[in-house]
């Protein structure tokens, strides 16, 4: 079986509180986009994981696709599988590619082996893989709170708009991103802004908290956002903790080829 685990963008991202367990509570809107990896899983005589495309750091055992298999293997007597991941979504970009890979692996294994797991059960397994993973089970735009694992319906439809994502050749570690954050509850939450404000107003009020500290230290990332607005973006923002930046446009907009990774599509 082959699937195409897709990325997401953050429309607004507020870090609201540091928890006693060391994690942070947040609020954001996660919005799926079509930029995708390619994941193949087939039953086999031996358990094997391989990858191609973008080099994935760390050892194979830490990959969320393989962790998804081991998670289900604990509760179900499923056969061994051969997993191959062709990595296209940039790593460490705030696009959720790794989380999507793990969630899609759960969904595929559920289907391949007829485990009859419900959406809620799959989300529960996904939450054990990582905070962003449960989102990719339903894979629909959601208002997200908690550590990124609590979802509410949000009224948003960007269909017909065009999106460009640029990932500069910069890596932002989670430690660096959070080092510049002072958790604070925003005066107006993301859901209210998206549902009740025109997109033309988002520029000044729909904020990604990580930009405050990352932009001064990595001006190349800030320059991408400036470039988007210069080209007529309705809204532009860094996604997640970076380093990818996206711009939403009324029509397709061309950008010069650079060393940066560029992806564009109609929403």
Image: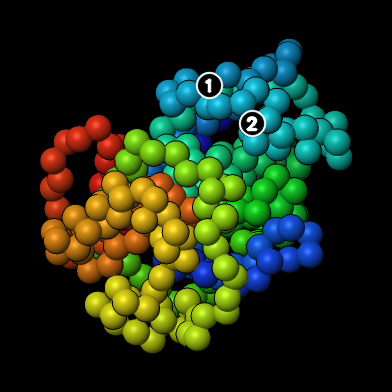
Q: How many labels does the image show?
A: 2
Q: In which quarter of the image is residue 194?
A: bottom left
Look at the numbered discs 2 and 1 and tell me whether their residues touch, using CB distance below 8 Å: yes
For the point 55% across and 63% down, the residue is: 181
Q: In which quarter of the image is the N terminus?
A: top right
For the point 36% across and 56% down, the residue is: 216
In the rendered image, residue 105, in percent from the top left (x then y), is placed at 62, 37
Would you say 68 lies left or right of 2 here?
right
What colour scheme has been applied to the protein in the rendered image? Answer: rainbow
Q: In the rendered image, which residue does mark 2 sit on?
A: 63
Above or below residue 170? Residue 78 is above
At mark 2, the secondary structure is loop
Closest to the observer: 244 or 87? 244
Would you say 104 lies left or right of 256 here?
right
For the point 25% across and 52% down, the residue is: 223
The numbered mark, 2 or 1, whose residue comes first in the sequence reads 1
Q: Seen from this angle, which residue lies furthest top? A: 45
From where the camera sits, is residue 145 visible?
no
In the rendered image, residue 257, in percent from the top left (x then y), is placed at 17, 36
Point out which mark residue 51 bears: 1
Q: Quadrant of residue 98?
A: top right
Q: Quadrant of the C terminus?
A: bottom left
Q: Seen from this angle, which residue lies furthest front? A: 217
At mark 1, the secondary structure is strand
Give the CA distance from mark 2 to mark 1.
10 Å
Above or below residue 185? Residue 265 is above
């Amino acid at each position: 079986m082959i699937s195409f685990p897709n990325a997401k963008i953050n429309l607004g991202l507020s870090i609201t509180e540091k928890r006693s367990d060391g994690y942070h509570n947040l609020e954001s809107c996660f919005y799926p986009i079509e930029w995708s990896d390619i994941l193949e899983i087939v039953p086999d005589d031996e358990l094997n994981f391989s990858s191609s495309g973008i080099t994935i750091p760390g050892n194979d055992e830490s990959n969320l696709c393989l962790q998804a298999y081991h998670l289900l293997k604990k509760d179900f007597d499923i056969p061994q599988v051969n997993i191959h991941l062709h990595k296209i979504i940039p790593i460490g970009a705030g696009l959720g590619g790794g989380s999507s890979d793990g969630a899609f692996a759960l969904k595929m294994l559920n289907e391949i082996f007829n485990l009859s797991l419900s959406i809620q059960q799959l989300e529960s397994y996904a939450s054990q893989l990582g905070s962003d993973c449960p989102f990719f089970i339903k894979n629909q735009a959601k208002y997200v709170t908690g550590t990124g694992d609590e979802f509410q319906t949000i009224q948003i439809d960007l269909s017909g708009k065009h999106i460009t994502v640029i990932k500069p050749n910069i890596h932002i570690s989670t430690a660096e991103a959070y080092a510049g954050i002072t958790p604070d509850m925003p005066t107006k939450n993301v859901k209210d802004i998206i549902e009740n404000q025109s997109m033309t107003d988002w520029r000044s009020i729909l904020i990604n908290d990580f930009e405050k500290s990352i932009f001064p230290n990595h001006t190349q990332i800030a320059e991408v956002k400036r470039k988007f607005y210069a080209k007529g973006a309705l809204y532009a923002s860094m996604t997640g903790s970076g380093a990818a930046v996206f711009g939403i446009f009324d029509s397709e907009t061309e950008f010069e080829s650079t060393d940066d990774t560029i992806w564009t599509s109609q929403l």
